[in-house]
Amino acid sequence: MGTSGAGKSTLMSLLAGLDQPTTGSITLLDSTISAMDDEQRAKIRGESIGFVFQNFLLIPSLTALQNVTLPMVLRGNEDEESNNLKAKALLKEVGLAGRETHLPTQLSGGEQQRVALARAFVTQPKILFADEPTGNLDQKTAQHIIELLFAMNKEQGTTLVLVTHDAELAKRCQRTLIINDGQCQESA
Amino acid sequence: MKSNKMIINWSLREIWFGQLWPVMVALTLIIACVVALSTLALRVEKVMTEQGRTLLAADLVFRSSNPIPTSLIEKAEQAGLTVSSQSRFQTMAFSDVNMQLVTVKSVQTNYPLRGDLNLNNQNNEISHQVNPGELWISDRLLSLLDTKVGEVLAIGDAELSITGIIKDEPELAYNPFNSIPNLFIHENDLEKTGAVQVGSRVRYRLFINGDLTTLANLQNDYELQAGESWVDQNKESRAARLMDKAKQYLSLTILMVILMAAVTLILTCLHYARNRSETVSMLKSMGASRKWLRLWLTTQVLIMFAIAFVVGSASGLLLEFLLRLPLTDILPKELPSVGVQPFVFAIGVALCIGLPALLIPLNRLLDAPAINVIQQQQTTRYSKTSWWLLLLPITALIVFYGSNKLVWMVLIGLLVLFTLLAGLSYGLLTLLSRFKWKAAFSLALSRISRSPKNSMMQLAALSGSLMLVALIWLIKSDLLGDWQQTLSPDAPNVFAINISPEQQQGYLQQVDTLKLPHSDTFAIIRGRWTAINGVNNTEHPSYNEENIRILRREINFTWAKELPVYNEVVAGEWKGEKNVSIAQGVAEELGVVIGDKLTFEVNSQSFTATVNSIRAVEWQSLKPNFVFIFSEDVVENLPATWMLSFRAEESQTHLVNQLARLYPTVTLLDLRTMANKIQGLLRQISWSLTGLAALGVVGGVLLIFTLLRLSLSERKREITLYRTLGASKKRISHTLWAEYGLLAISAGLVAAIAAEIILYSLMTWGFELPTQLHPTMWLVLPLLAVLIVFVSLSSVIKQLLKPLR
């Protein structure tokens, strides 16, 4: 948790191996990712990490189903049938059964984020990073997305790293760190 | 394998739904244009070559002032070439009542090897060959000799009865002084005429047909002796120059269209790369390796090339067909086939332009950092490794256009001009923004000056395309204008020479009475040019050059009180005594300048005159023209005859014949048939060029269209922001119109300046034609730009301003 500009996103980028620290080292899932090059870090991300972004970041030219199966394809999981089966199940879980062939532009913001949730869980990641996942949604939709996120997280046993400035949301997490001006401290 | 299938699927969707389709449209356009233009160019060139050969009467002609060496004929026949020989000479022809100087062409039965020889006999039957014992004469000769078909003519010592009239013949004589009436006899009857003797002036020709390599080998193996020369379609003076320019124009048009398409391709591709960097970052965050991303992008590029090639080739052929429709009367029924060359060329061009245009931005796309999904980085370091791809088009240019002066002039001119002019107009627009304007204008101006790089790019692309469009059209008009001037509808077509001084006034009056439009009369003094500033011409470095004969041959001199109005004085001044005015081309070729003292010889009498002026002379104009015009005092005592030229229509043949009868000693050179033939040829070529130019212009306008729509769609986010901030629809649309209007007007002006400068250089150094300013263009280009902007943007702006959701 932290205010805007406190350094939440920077920390998350470092943790997820999206960025490199100038000094110090980062160990993620027993690997010193700060010593790895771009490609090695990408491999780790593909195998064990999932993301949910504030602005959904779906591929506009792919259908909902194709967006969900994409991480599997990137992993080299080429069994189309089983990928689709898995993706359909997840889409059903987020309440989008029957919308598989829709393009992102045909979906509302909340629906797009639900597709993004399905995409994040499809690879059963060990860690899921969510960057202000409800920042672009209205309150009601946001609530629904959060419920889904926590439910799926529980069900899949994923470690969820959530970045937010919403104290209510932070309370639902097992551990809260507060960042202020680049300094990190455990919340009381 | 399956992931490949997925990537292919995705790529297709990306092309269809994503921003890749403008890239593909540009690529398709390049291929379509190149296929269409090069197919047409190839066809037209083949037709032109065919026509050039028709004029020559063969694929290759060997000319000599001595009988054709038997060894050459044997060699040609052994190589499987078809040959036909001809000897021609001038002699007197006598009918019962009259006599006339004629050119006798003695030919073999298989003459001509190319082109049409149409002979019309007594019974009005057409034949195409000259057989032994036959005598064919021109219509005019028939009336000059006051005889008719079937009667006997004496040609030298031979007596032959006239078989019929020559309707059409190949081998046009371009030199009016050679155009003495023709007649054809068969080679077998040549000896009977007794005209060919030791010392008589006979010219020999060997016409040769066959495939190009064998012809070239024959030419290479034979060592030319004095007085011998080869003539092929490429060398034949005027027709060849004409076609040369037409060909240059074709390649220039193709190049310009390619340039325009390339600009669009680059811009659309940059646009795509900008829009996709977020996607790439996202894919990277999800663990996509560079290898996978490369595969993904490569598949897209391959699919685009494949689709563009198929669709482009098909539409290119269709385009060529449409372009050819108005030319059906002109082009022969059976078109020469073009083979695969245009397609190979098109794919080559597409690869040369497409690979760097696509791969450089796409390769940079690979460098989009994964962190961008969370935090947009201020600066990203992109690798520049793929810049070597630029070598591809550059190498191709050097290989294919290396020696083409025109192309390099256009390219370098473009580069220099655009940097200069885009900077200039941008400066001007920034300057304008310093003053107070209405809100819409000042907003527009500030937007232009706020993003200099973007505005400059847009300005350069817009004015560049406009300029190319203007160039394609103007060069065409200038070329055609020049050609048409060559043979304007009122150009003189009959020359009267050998008018004696006593006849001069009477003849002039007679031509006036017959109401034939005519030139002034000119004195003709035959003589030689012997020295420059006291140095004998035989010592001139150019004395022995094949193409410069003026130092060796007899020349027609004249004198004048005033220089002809159609000769523009380009240096010096026509006044004073003991002076001579020289034609510009000759002066430049031989390094003669104002003040040089030139020595001449007429009837072994030597005299000197000082060059006081240099005149621009258009030799093609068929008006009486002279290399040297003296002041009267220099030549007044020398023996002279007079000449004049006049215009006679086809229906006025009887007037021409009346003149001939009234003044039997005056020689009439009737160029009407020849002029008609050249005019026909010109008409055909100009049609092809107009078609090509139109295609180039349409292509250019289309590209500008795409470009503008693209640039506006990039503004979507900004416009949404303005709307959110409460700007009224009217305010936004006014600002947009003001911005693009200003851009269009300045681009139009920049294009006009650039086109004028490039056109001047092209015409002067490339086509070697006179130039003039094109004031209408200065008005038309900005207007055209505004019009295109209006047409292409109104729907986009309307769409952008739809109510916000």
Image (cartoon, rainbow, N blue to C red):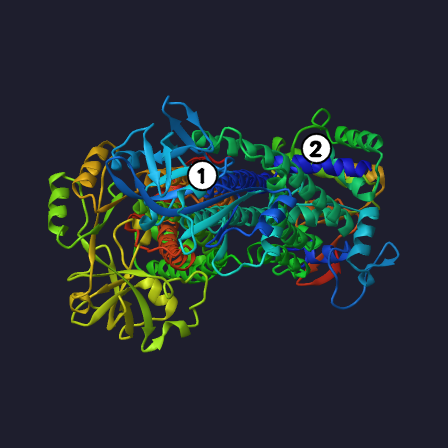
The one nearer the camera, B422 or B333, is B333
Q: Secondary structure at mark 2?
A: helix
The amino acid sitting under disc 1 is Asp
Q: Is residue B653 left or right of residue B403?
A: left
Up the image or down, B755 lies above or below A91; here it is below
Question: Where residue A24 sits: x, y (%)?
Answer: 79, 67
Q: Nearer the viewer, mark 2 or mark 1?
A: 1
For the point 40% across and 72% down, which residue is it?
B538
Residue B449 drawn above or below residue A70: below
Q: Which residue is mark 2?
A: A64
User: Please, what is the three-letter code of the amino acid marked with disc 2?
Assistant: Ala
Q: CA distance from mark 2 to mark 1?
A: 93 Å
Q: Please tell me whether residue B606 is drawn above or below residue B458 in the rendered image.
A: below
Residue shown at 49% from the left, 56% from the top: B228
- Foreground residue among B338 and A79: B338
* x then y, percent, for residue B349: 60, 47
Number of residues whose C-alpha sits closer than 10 Å to that of mark 1, classed few (under 14), some (14–19) or many (20 or more): some
Q: Name the residue carrying label 1.
A: B189
